Amino acid sequence: MKKNLVLVLLVMTGIAAKAQENVIKFNIFSPIVKTFNASYERKVSATSSFQLGGFFTSYSPGETNFSGFGITPEYRFYLSSTEAPEGVYVAPFVRYQSFKLTEDTSNSKGTLSTFGGGLVIGKQWIFKEKISLDIFIGPQYSSGKVKVTDGTDTFDTGAFDGFGVRTGLTLGFAF
């Protein structure tokens, strides 16, 4: 009986010590710009992971209103001594975005599709083997094309087209 109890305790300890391989997270600053942003990260090896993020937005940085979505795959290389998905990382990424545009002053309408990429550096913590906190920043470039469907091209697409900075702070659940 004692041998069985010891065996059960050893198995349970091994299960409890299992590293987390998946993280679902949400960018906590996104609601400030009327955006819902979520990501799923999957550990690939001890030092790397793949993340797929997506967002939906209805954002108006000026005269132009943007309504649409984006998708961002990235591959993370963890540089710290802890195993992925925890620690310091660098991550190249690509991003596709598709928006409907409206411009209130001229009553113009159109669409914008962009494709781009960049590189972020960040750090992710896993607390109590369940809660993730991830902070990142890095340069990005997106190139896009506006298609006018009504009116003239008076759209200010600078918020989503050209050079910029990708930054975020996410809170999530590791499992």
Image (cartoon, rainbow, N blue to C red):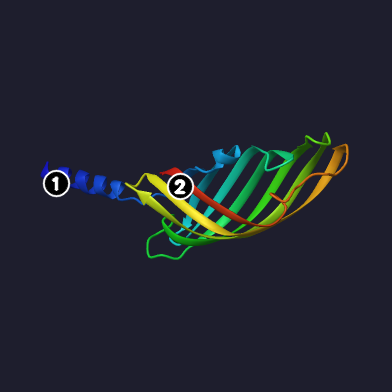
Residue that appears at 78% across and 37% down: 103
Q: Amino acid at mark 2?
A: Asn
Disc 2 is placed on an element classified as strand
Look at 39% across and 49% down and name the residue there: 20
Q: Is residue 59 above or below residue 123?
A: above
Percent of width and height locating residue 17 = 30, 50
- Residue 105 in picture, x, y percent from top left: 80, 36
The residue that disc 1 covers is: 3
Q: Which residue is located at x 77 percent, y 44 percent?
A: 112
Mark 1 is surrounded, within 10 Å at the Cα level, by few (under 14), some (14 to 19) or many (20 or more) other residues, namely few
Q: Amino acid at mark 1?
A: Lys
**In the image, which disc is placed on residue 15?**
none
Residue occupied by mark 2 = 22
| Foreground pick, 7 / 159 | 159
Expressed as whole percent of the image width and height from the top left, the position of residue 3 reads 14, 46
Quadrant hosting residue 172: top left
